């Protein structure tokens, strides 16, 4: 464990048990090992814990100090009992998701790691309170302040969707923080997912009171699910209550699906119909009935706040980050100003705040003087009032500095008039509509500068154009003077070019003939290559057919001799001598022989697994050397070789005794037929199609032997051919046999 000494703050690392006494090596004082690794002054990686500030579903959050950078952080530590692979993966995903997103309204993650089995994530520390704590303290939140909070959260969700297609899935007051400066920050991306990560039957996640109907249903989500949760949060802020409350998860889900929340404008809280409709649309049951995306919601919030904010001009624009607390005292307007705005809705008069305060103070002092003070004091107080009223507002000094700086630049002849004119225009925009006398002097002084700069600019542009015209005239004269000489040179060059073209045409004709001859040679060579490739291909095919036929003939001999072990070894050896391209061919025959050997050994050597089981209605009593002993009615014991039983009966028996040996039914039937000596039967070809190649190789070998015998004994060859035809009378191999024996049959 690592911790800091409580006296000298030096780092101490020890393996002593928790709570054990220890002398600090730096200051020598006696201290104690903390009872847990999460107490004050405990060190985890680069962070020193200060105090516990919160606890969530998957971990605890501590206020801590990062040693390397000496900054305060919020250190989230995964609960030790939850350190399994799934929860740890979700925890790391939250850290990575938060680290990728940098936004004023999102809590930023900048470190994640693991030390001694403790998973942690460091985030920027927020000095403030959660929206949940604010609601517990105040009960309800005023309309425009609530809309202001929701607007900032919506900006965070909009950014997360635009940057990473993230859906938060857990928007609620617990996860909304308000800093001491009034900035709203969305926290806890632990349940956030990228829309592309969604899969069917995904675990349902979220806080039931704030979950959308589609979250409860486990459907694919998009940003409109967060809009629903944000609508529930806004309803709670404005009314002080959740719209849906129940004791169980199922009951809350039922309310979200079926119940309609009481509209806010009907609660008697003075909430306008427009605000009520905004919340209602955010909380619609079907996603298609809500705002189509977060940008549409933000725009509607902005329009609604034009009617709810005490001063609509201080409402942050769409996608404008609000970085300070709303000053509602500053936003409040006097009834007189409101009446003027109602009378002149299109007259937006900008009055300096300091100027307005000075005027109000002057009017109040004047009437107090008239009604209270005797005349001797009126003159004195009037002088004070006049002096106060003539005091310049704060922005005058700022304007003076800007104008003085502009005058210094005007004195510099190297400064471009265009840039100076732009700067002067910007200073003009600072002046209030109602100016003091000093401001008025500066205003007209600046106006004169702008006029002078515009004139200078136009004169410079005129001189520049004149110089450009002179330059063009000079270039034209130069071109005209050289044109005559160039024409003569051009004529001579044309003649030389003509003669060169003729010579080139003759050369091209010669080259064309040579290219044609070369093309004919290339065609001949390509034809020869093609013929050679065809010959090589035929030779390779013939060679392949020859060695395959040889291998299959030998394999058939070993098969006929029931020597399956030798056959398997033979194939394995031959496979090692050929290229890897034929491994699949060898493996198919090896698998076939191996299965034949396993079946033969299972029934031949005896197996206790089948004793007591039924075979074609008879109970098996013993298996020995290929004979199956079974009991008939009356207790009579009889035996039959296992070959004599049907493939169906044997398959049903193995399904119960050894299913892995039974395998596929068609393959089983094929191999049983082979073991019974019917390798050329249709069920063999159906179950193992590649055995047809072996059959053809055996037939070709047999026919070749007959043809050899026919050279010296046609009668013997004819008898052998007749036996072969009789054997394969109804076989699919009959056409092949007749085609090969056709000449011999005619001779016989």
Image (cartoon, grey):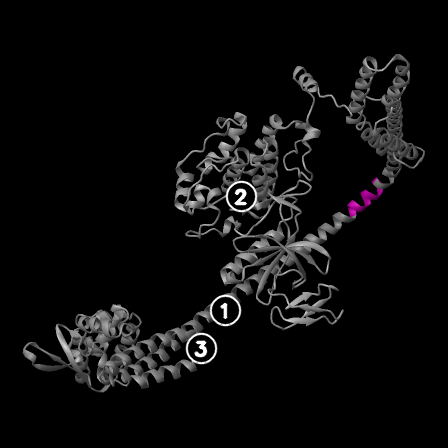
Image position, residue 593 (x, y; %) = 30, 79
Q: Crowding near pointer 2: few (<14 within 10 Å), some, many (20+)?
A: many
For the record, the magenta segment spans 487-495
Camera-side residue: 626 or 573? 626
Look at discs 1 and 2 and give the one toward the viewer.
Answer: 2
Image position, residue 397 (x, y; %) = 87, 31
**Cα distance in 3D space between marks 1 and 2:** 78 Å
Left or right: residue 593 compared with residue 543: left
Residue 153 versus residue 598 in the image, above or below: above
Q: Is residue 534 magenta?
A: no
Q: Crowding near pointer 3: few (<14 within 10 Å), some, many (20+)?
A: few
Mark yes or no: residue 565 visible: yes
**Cα distance in 3D space between marks 3 and 1:** 25 Å
The residue carrying mark 1 is 529
Q: Which residue is drawn at the image coordinates 82% and 15% (left, top)?
A: 372
The image's mark for residue 579 is 3
The residue carrying mark 2 is 172
Residue 455 versus residue 742 in the image, above or below: above
Image position, residue 265 (x, y; %) = 50, 27
Indicate which disc, 3 or 1, sits on the residue closer to the N terminus: 1
Image position, residue 392 (x, y; %) = 86, 26
Count of numbered circles in the view: 3
Q: Secondary structure at mark 3?
A: loop
Q: Secondary structure at mark 2?
A: loop
Camera-side residue: 550 or 333? 333
The image's mark for residue 619 is none
């Amino acid at each position: 464990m690592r911790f800091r000494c409580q006296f000298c703050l030096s780092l101490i690392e020890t393996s002593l048990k928790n709570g054990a006494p220890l002398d600090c090596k730096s200051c020598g004082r006696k201290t104690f090992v903390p009872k847990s690794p999460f107490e004050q002054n405990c060190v985890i990686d680069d962070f020193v814990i200060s105090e516990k500030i919160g606890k969530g579903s998957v971990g605890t959050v501590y206020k801590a100090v990062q040693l390397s950078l000496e900054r305060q952080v919020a250190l989230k530590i995964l609960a030790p009992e939850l350190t399994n692979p799934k929860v740890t993966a979700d925890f790391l995903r939250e850290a990575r998701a938060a680290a990728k997103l940098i936004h004023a309204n999102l809590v930023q993650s900048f470190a994640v790691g693991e030390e001694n089995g403790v998973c942690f994530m460091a985030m920027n520390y927020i000095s403030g309170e959660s929206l949940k704590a604010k609601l517990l303290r105040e009960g309800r939140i005023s309309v425009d302040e609530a809309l202001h909070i929701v607007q900032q959260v919506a900006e965070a969700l909009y950014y997360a969707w635009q940057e990473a297609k993230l859906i938060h899935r857990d928007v609620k007051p617990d996860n909304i923080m308000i800093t001491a400066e009034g900035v709203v920050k969305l926290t806890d991306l632990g349940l956030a997912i990228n829309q592309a990560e969604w899969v069917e039957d995904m675990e349902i996640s979220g806080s039931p009171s704030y979950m959308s109907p589609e979250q409860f249903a486990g459907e694919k989500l998009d940003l409109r699910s967060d809009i629903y949760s944000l609508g529930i949060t806004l309803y709670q802020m404005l009314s002080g209550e959740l719209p849906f409350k129940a004791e169980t998860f199922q009951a809350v889900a039922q309310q979200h699906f079926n119940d309609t929340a009481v509209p806010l404008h009907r609660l008697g809280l003075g909430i306008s119909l427009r605000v009520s409709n905004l919340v209602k649309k955010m909380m619609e049951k079907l996603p298609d009935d809500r705002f189509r995306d977060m940008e549409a919601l933000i725009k509607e919030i902005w329009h609604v706040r034009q009617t709810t904010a005490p001063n609509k001009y201080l409402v942050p624009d769409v996608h404008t980050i609000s970085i300070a607390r709303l000053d509602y005292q500053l936003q409040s307007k006097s009834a007189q100003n409101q009446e003027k705005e109602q009378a002149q809705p299109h007259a937006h008069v900008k009055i300096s705040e300091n100027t307005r305060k000075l005027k109000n103070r002057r009017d109040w002092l004047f009437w107090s003087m008239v009604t209270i003070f005797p005349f001797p004091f009126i003159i004195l107080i009037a002088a004070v009032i006049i002096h106060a009223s003539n005091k310049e507002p704060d922005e005058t000094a700022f304007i003076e500095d800007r104008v003085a700086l502009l005058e210094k630049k005007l004195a510099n002849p190297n400064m471009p008039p265009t840039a100076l004119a732009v700067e002067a225009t910007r200073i003009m925009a600072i002046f209030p509509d109602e100016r003091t006398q000093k401001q008025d002097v500066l205003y007209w002084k600046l106006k004169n500068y702008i006029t002078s700069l515009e004139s200078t600019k136009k004169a410079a542009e005129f001189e520049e154009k004149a110089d450009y015209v002179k330059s063009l005239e000079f270039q034209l004269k130069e071109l005209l003077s050289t044109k005559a000489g160039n024409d003569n040179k051009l004529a001579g060059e044309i003649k030389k070019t003509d003669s060169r073209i003729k010579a080139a045409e003759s050369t091209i004709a010669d080259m064309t003939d040579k290219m044609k001859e070369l093309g004919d040679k290339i065609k001949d060579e390509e034809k020869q290559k093609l013929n050679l490739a065809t010959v090589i291909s035929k030779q390779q095919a013939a060679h392949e057919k020859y060695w395959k036929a040889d291998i299959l003939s030998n394999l058939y001999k070993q098969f006929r001799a029931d020597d399956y072990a030798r056959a398997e070894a033979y194939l394995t050896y031959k496979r090692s001598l050929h290229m890897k391209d034929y491994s699949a061919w060898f493996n198919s025959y090896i698998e076939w022989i191996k299965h034949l050997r396993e079946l033969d050994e299972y029934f031949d050597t005896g197996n206790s697994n089948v004793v007591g089981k039924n075979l074609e209605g008879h109970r098996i009593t013993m298996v020995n050397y290929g004979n199956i002993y079974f009991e008939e009615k009356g207790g009579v014991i009889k035996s039959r070789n296992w070959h004599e039983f049907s493939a169906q009966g044997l398959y049903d028996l193995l399904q119960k005794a050894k299913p892995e040996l039974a395998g596929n039914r068609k393959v089983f039937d094929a191999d049983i037929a082979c073991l019974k000596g019917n390798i050329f039967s249709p069920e063999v070809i159906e179950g193992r199609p590649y055995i047809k190649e072996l059959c053809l190789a055996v037939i070709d070998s047999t026919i070749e032997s007959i043809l050899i015998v026919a050279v010296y004994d046609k009668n013997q060859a004819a008898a052998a051919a007749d036996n072969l035809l009789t054997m394969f009378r109804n076989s699919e191999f009959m056409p092949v046999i007749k085609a090969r024996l056709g000449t011999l049959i005619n001779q016989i």
